[in-house]
Image: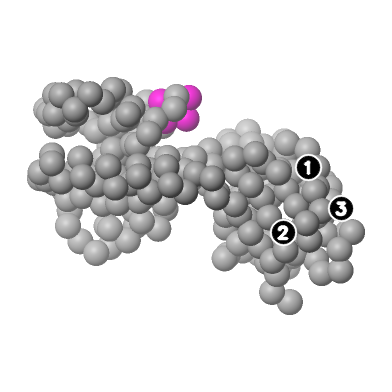
Amino acid sequence: MKILVIEDNAGLAQNLFEYFGRQGYTLDWAADGVSGLHLAITEKFDVIILDLTLPGMDGIEICRKLREEAFQDVPIIMLTARDTVDERVRGLDVGADDYLVKPFDLKELNSRIQALTRRANSQWRSKTLVVGNLSLDTLTLEVTREGRPLKLPPIQLKLLKFLMINTQRVIASSELEHAIWGDDPPETSALRTHLHTLRQIIDKPFEQPLLKTIPGMGYRLTDEK
């Protein structure tokens, strides 16, 4: 098992390396948020141990970027020194899978890692996003509607996945642009063009449109009429 530790406390990181190293795990360590996010995106890990308070970029923002922009579903355990409901809710809302308050027992952390990885391994075959009769297999990237296979260009596929993950809310144009192009979006009409192409593929051949424009607010993918 390969674990990424994103933690600015060198002493705690060393304890984690010593304990999990004895269990036969491989660990990488980042002492700040920016380095941690880079490692998480560019390398493959089985679980991420993520501190909430970090220099450069906090754990909330790292978790959000991994879920909403990098579309990663690696199990994340968030660590915090503050045992408050608001802190736990913030972490879980952006996609953390579990929460542990410092100081903690390393055996408990190990048990939680085992539980998360067992759950992830048992579910990997069924990672399918569904909105109405539209589905996206996140492993094979196959898209179907009413059982018909649909072929999407890369940007439309990325847009669709982001919209399906966030089907419960309206997404502003600026958030969509950031999810697809990061901090360097193209000229203004590019997003509208790509959304038009997406509509032509997923909606035009079918009776009910799923991709809705919410005037003055943004876009939402939903089967609600």
Which region shows up in magenta? 38-42
- x, y percent for residue 1: 32, 29
In primary-sequence order, the first of circles 1 and 3 is: 1
The one of 50 and 74 positioned closer to us in this rendering: 74
Tell me the quadrant of the picture where the C terminus can be found.
bottom right
Instruction: Give the CA distance from mark 1 to mark 2.
Output: 13 Å
Asked whether residue 34 is in view, the answer is no
Q: Nearer the viewer, mark 3 or mark 2?
A: 2
- In this rendering, position of residue 40 left or right of residue 149: left
Q: Nearer the viewer, mark 1 or mark 2?
A: 2
Which residue carries the number 1 mark? 152
At 67% across and 41% down in the image, what residue appears? 141
- x, y percent for residue 186: 72, 36
Question: Can you tell which quarter of the image residue 220 is in?
Answer: bottom right
Label at residue 200: 3
Which residue carries the number 2 mark? 134
Badge 3: residue crowd in 10 Å (few <14, some 14–19, many ≥20): few
Q: How is the structure coloured here?
A: one colour
- What's under tag 3, amino acid-wise? Gln
At 66% across and 62% down in the image, what residue appears? 131
- Count numbered badges in the picture: 3
Instruction: Give the CA distance from mark 3 to mark 2.
Output: 14 Å
